Amino acid sequence: MSESGTLLAPQAVTIPDHDAVAVFNVQTSDMRNVFQYQTDDINVNDVDTQDINYYVRLYDGNSAALGAPVWPANLVLNAANAMMDDTLSYNGIDVTDNNISAPQKLVKHDILRYLSQRLFNTSKGVDLFSNVHAMKENISGKCGNFTGGASSSIHVALSSVSTTSTDSNALLYTDISNNNIRYLNNDSSGNNNITRMLMNQIAQYDPSRFVITDGLADYDLRPVPFIDGDVLNFTVIFNAAAGQNNLTGVAAIPSRTYLIKLVLGSGSLRNTAVVDSALVADCAYSRFTSEIVPALSSASTPVYGGEAVPTAVPAPLTYFGWHYISNADALNLVFAPNTASCTVANVTSVYMTARIISKVRLPRITIYTAPTFSGDAAVGYHSAVTYAPSSVVITDDLDWQFGFDLTGVTGGATAGFTANLLDGYEKGAMSVLTSEGPFGAAEQILSFNIQTDSVVPGDVEFILTSLVICETIGAVVTNKVYNFQPF
């Protein structure tokens, strides 16, 4: 097939009004893998409903068996972490200040400078806020993959019309000739038909891309013909907290709208890593992958909790995460290793982030290895080593990062805590508190447990925001971040 022409009716791109522009750089190949279409080999210029089917591929399976992800697991479009200092960014505050590092020139930092400008008549007054870190984390949480977050909303919209959708939309058809995947056609002409909308816009500006010479059969799926330099856009609007202007008696603070550009490219792409958040995986192509943990009562939770159940974060705190206060039961949250074959020697570092409310007793992390039924330390596990914060003066009502490095050690010894340190958190190295069994390098990891050891009311109280497990097996590095869905 070699006909050329306008595949669809051209549709002009309307850019929403906005105050500033921020950027993520994304791989063209990833977007081509996600947004695809199928057409026959006769009427490529015809917009008849039988000529074109539109697909959004988040997984390579169907609704009954999702299969492998097509959307990269480490591509999180958390607008709070989009770059304000990219060449395509616009109207960022203080982005030309060389005293401010690139990791401090993301949208969440820009918002705080905007509030400072409005409240104090200078963008340099951010440090006058007593809760800067909490504000940044609150912004990140609302823009992320938690239920209701901006990034989550994008995925919900894509998922509802995807090849694996379980939606009851009457216009969402099932392709019985292609693994029962689901699709839309021209019966659906609204904005929910995202692939169609993208193709219409390409037809407006560069219809020659729809010259089909790929040699594929008419029943094959073809990628939407994105090329390097294309841009996909979405907007986010930030509103100051009610009454925020009363802090200094200024006029009501206007909202600030950001246009987030997804700039398509190939090869090595620049995206600024997140270095100051428990949501460290929430950026484009992070070296971390994220797992959002729902409530323990959810059947889909990847975490098992056999004793106390965390609760919602109490007002007036605005942190995301799970709240725990000691009472009748101790806490014991159980996390599997990133890979089933992980051994003690494969664990490189482990850390948790938490808002400490009571320092009488602190949470700890225990690593259990799988039983071998020969010389096991106890029923259910071969070895167990518990790590607890040490060598720090714990202060209540501060955000802490507790962790330890564990590269190639035996017997539970640690090499301090130097990996993955986050800005904005107090640091606390964890060391061995108790040890059972040999904890040899070749022992297979059974679980990582966040635990407490007191049921005295109020002895232990904290808000758990993340657990990070870093493993290296051969040349394969897996850094997994668990973030805890607010109730």
Image (spheres, helix red, strand yellow):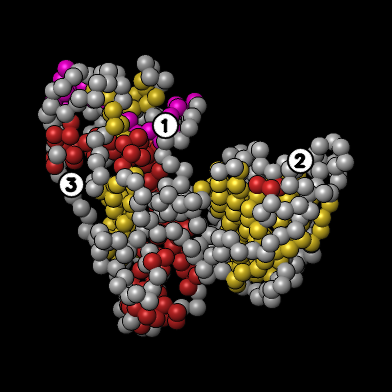
User: Dominant secondary structure of the magenta stretch?
Assistant: loop
Disc 1 target residue: 165
> Can you give x and y, in whole percent of width and height, for residue 299 in the image?
61, 39
Give the Cα separation between the discs numbered 1 and 3: 27 Å
The residue that disc 2 covers is: 370
- The residue range painted magenta reads 42-64
In the rendered structure, the answer to whether residue 201 lies left or right of residue 24 reads left
The residue lying toward the viewer, choosing from 157 and 361, is 361
Where disc 1 sits, the SS reads loop
Q: Is residue 334 left or right of residue 419?
A: right
Q: Quadrant of residue 452?
A: bottom right
Amino acid carrying label 1: it is Ser
- Look at the image and say whether residue 442 sits in the magenta stretch: no
Q: Position of residue 169 (x, y in %)?
A: 36, 30
Contact? badges 1 and 2 (CB < 8 Å): no
Examine the rendered structure and indicate whether residue 297 appears above or below residue 413. above
Q: Nearer the viewer, residue 345 or 182?
A: 345
Which of label 1 and label 2 is nearer to you? 2
